[in-house]
Every structure is written in structure tokens, then in C-alpha cells.
Amino acid sequence: MKAYILIQFNLINRELFGSYIKAASSTIPAFGGQVIVAQENPEATEGSLNTTRTTIIEFPSKDAAMNWYNSNDYADVKHLRHEATDNGTLIFLEAWQRPQH
């Protein structure tokens, strides 16, 4: 079952974040992942957002997503995201499956 990582945060250092994007994006394909959404200032139709950037990464499974997140390659660059952003959240989500009748 596919899984997703939802990341939301406020960008505070664009240059450092650019370094993170360059380094982190090369680690994702090895785990079968791909970035499917990366947007600054998304529009909230209901409620309000407390963050200015949203990213969604798709993986073939939750195990693949967790393996990427816990990999040595990603560990080497994760600190760049933490230093370049604030008010961040990272959430693992499994794809919804229609209940069987």
C-alpha cells in the first residue's frame, strides 16, 4: 500500500533550504519515492495554515518511507531542513483503502 510523507513548515533561510532540496531530493528515488507536491503559500479553503510551505512525498509503502527517513543518506542532510525552517511537522500517512463489503 502506498504511503506519503506530509511536511509543512515556515521557510526562514531560502539559500540553506535550496541546499537541502538539492541534497535531499537525490536520496528519495533509491527508496522508490517521488515528490508529488511542493508548494509555497498554499491556499487554505477551510481553516487556516500556520505554515508557508507544504511538501508531499509518495513512497510504495510505509516501510519504504520509514527506511528513507531513517537512512544514513537522509540523516546527513536532514539538519539542513531543520536549520532552514521553523514550525515544522512531518507526518507519515498510509494510502486510504476503500472498505471491503
Image (cartoon, grey):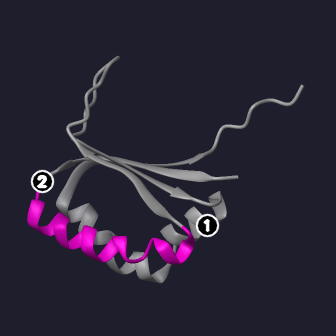
**Percent x, y of residue 28:** 45, 71
Say left or right for 72 vs 18: right
- Say few, some or many: other residues with alpha carbon within 10 Å of mark 1 (under 14 / 14 to 19 / 20 or more): many
| Mark closest to the chain's N terminus, 2 or 1 | 2
Amino acid type at circle 1 is Ala
Q: Is residue 7 above or below residue 96?
A: below
Amino acid type at circle 2 is Ile
Disc 2 versus disc 1: nearer the observer: 1
Q: How many marks?
A: 2
**Percent x, y of residue 64:** 61, 67
What label sits on residue 100 in the rendered view? none
Residue 20 sits inside the magenta stretch: yes
Furthest toward the top, the residue is: 46
Q: Quadrant of residue 27?
A: bottom left
Say left or right for 83 vs 38: left
Residue at image point 51% right, 65% down? 33
Residue 34 sits inside the magenta stretch: no
Element carrying mark 2: loop
Q: Is residue 14 above or below residue 42?
A: below
Residue at image point 27% right, 62% down? 82
Q: Is residue 89 above or below residue 59?
A: above
Say left or right for 82 vs 90: left
Q: Is residue 44 above or below residue 20?
A: above
State the residue in front, 33 or 67: 33
Magenta-highlighted residues? 13-32
**Percent x, y of residue 90:** 42, 51
Principal secondary structure, stretch drawn in magenta: helix
What label sits on residue 64 in the rendered view? 1
State the residue in front, 76 or 40: 40
Spatial CA span between label 2 and label 1: 29 Å
